[in-house]
Image (tube, rainbow, N blue to C red):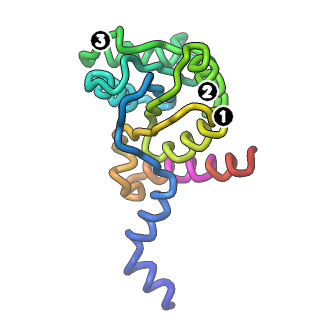
Amino acid sequence: MLSAVLFLVFSDRILWAAGSWLVLSETPQKADIIEVLGGDYEGNRISKACELVRSGFAPKALISGGGKFYGFHESRVAIDFAVAQGCPADYFIPWTYPAKATTDELDSVVAEFRRRGIHKVLLVTSPSHTARATRVFRRIAPDLEVHTVAAADPYWNHGYWWKSREGRKMWLLETLKTFADFLRL
């Protein structure tokens, strides 16, 4: 009974904490390149990258993604979206590797960074994906410096993820993926 009362009294704080461990977002800083991870179908990540390039944090953003949608790779669709929103196309480098998971995507991207002589990366993804993406990046490329910047995500709702059905689904999926990553599944 007491635990139920305590949960009701402190539920917002408990739920906030349950989501905060998924988030690792830093203040942007100058880098050699910006990496935009795929998986954002509303344009928030590429819009953040455009803002960061425009503000001088890096000269270009490499846009990766998971594969094709209606015959077009996610990176190309994202770039077309950003250009339609007023971003110059020359801000972006499309990366059309057919990844199915963050680890696959970053394996491919890191190899390209090494080929290009990149040493410092701003990694842009959704808030709930930042901590896991950063861990994966650092595991794959301990020799590269990475700083993660969260793009806006209306479903994450500034940490109040439990307020919408999509936010709750996002939290559950990212929590499961995080545990799977810890177990290397």
- Magenta span of residues: 169-177
Mark 3 packing: few (<14 Cα in 10 Å), some, or many (20+)? some
- Dot 3 falls on a residue whose secondary structure is loop
Mark 2 residue type: Glu
Whether 170 is among the magenta residues is yes
Mark earlier in primary sequence (1, 3): 3
Instruction: State the residue in front, 25 or 161.
Output: 25
Instruction: State the residue in front, 163 or 99.
Output: 99
Q: Where is residue 51 in the image (x, y as percent from the top left)?
A: 28, 27
Whether 184 is among the magenta residues is no
Residue 8 position by quadrant: bottom left
| CB atoms of marks 1 and 3 within 8 Å | no
The residue depicted at 57 percent of the width and 48 percent of the height is: 173
- Dot 1 falls on a residue whose secondary structure is helix
The residue depicted at 39 percent of the width and 70 percent of the height is: 13
Mark 3 residue type: Pro
Tell me if 63 is positioned left or right of 81 in this view: right
Tell me if 154 is positioned left or right of 2 in this view: left
Residue 105 numbered tag = 2
Q: Residue tagged by mark 1?
A: 140
- Dot 2 falls on a residue whose secondary structure is helix
* Foreground disc of the pair 2, 1: 1
Q: Position of residue 105 (x, y in %)?
A: 61, 27
Mark 1 residue type: Ile
Mark 1 packing: few (<14 Cα in 10 Å), some, or many (20+)? some
Q: Where is residue 23 in the image (x, y as percent from the top left)?
A: 46, 50
Mark earlier in primary sequence (2, 1): 2
Q: Residue tagged by mark 3?
A: 88
Q: In this view, does 14 lie above or below 24?
A: below
The residue depicted at 43 percent of the width and 50 percent of the height is: 167
